[in-house]
């Protein structure tokens, strides 16, 4: 989630080998606070990449500007897209892992 204080501003999806390292980097390049909501594992990198492409193409991606979210602004979404993101991830065999 992308937050401004206690208020959730939007959602961020992204591909990472190590989500903790990616989160640290995201926090450096955003004017907002960034928190992990869910993490998914895919059987193949192709499924993961395709899920991301479909999310960007079919959902309201690019919700935040590059100025607001420098690293990965294309994968930002309004909060109302959560179900769509989760459905696409599951369609491409993403399995949620424990945080």
Image: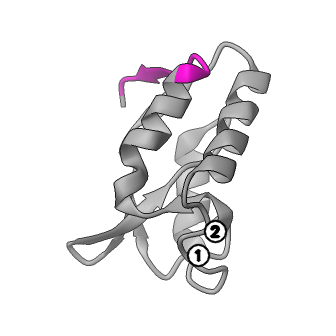
Please identify the residue farthest to the front as the structure is shown: 58
In percent of width and height, residue 97 lies at 42, 22
Q: Residue at x 42, y 52 (%)?
A: 81
Magenta residues span 91-98
Tag 1 secondary structure: loop
**In the rendered image, which residue does mark 1 sit on?**
69
Judge whether residue 94 is colored magenta. Answer: yes
Q: Counting other residues with Cα less than 10 Å from the Cα at mark 1, is it few (<14), some (14-19), or many (20 or more)?
A: many
Q: What's the distance in space between the residues labelled 2 and 1, CA to CA? A: 5 Å
The picture quadrant where one finds residue 69 is bottom right
Please identify the residue farthest to the right as the structure is shown: 46
Is 47 displayed left or right of 32 in the figure? right
Seen from the viewer's position, the closer of residues 43 and 25 is 43
Q: Residue at x 71, y 23 (%)?
A: 47
In percent of width and height, residue 77 lies at 49, 61
Q: Are marks 2 and 1 in contact (CB under 8 Å)?
A: yes
Residue 58 in the image: above or below residue 64: above
**In the rendered image, which residue does mark 2 sit on?**
73
Tag 2 secondary structure: helix
């Amino acid at each position: 989630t992308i937050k401004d204080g206690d208020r959730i501003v939007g959602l961020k999806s992204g591909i990472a080998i190590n989500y903790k390292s990616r989160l640290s980097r995201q926090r450096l390049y955003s004017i907002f606070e960034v928190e992990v909501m869910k993490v998914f594992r895919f059987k193949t990198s192709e499924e993961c990449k395709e899920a991301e492409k479909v999310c960007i193409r079919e959902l309201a991606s690019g919700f935040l500007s590059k100025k607001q979210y420098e690293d990965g602004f294309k994968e930002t979404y309004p909060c109302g897209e959560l179900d769509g993101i989760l459905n696409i991830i599951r369609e491409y065999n993403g399995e949620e892992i424990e945080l």
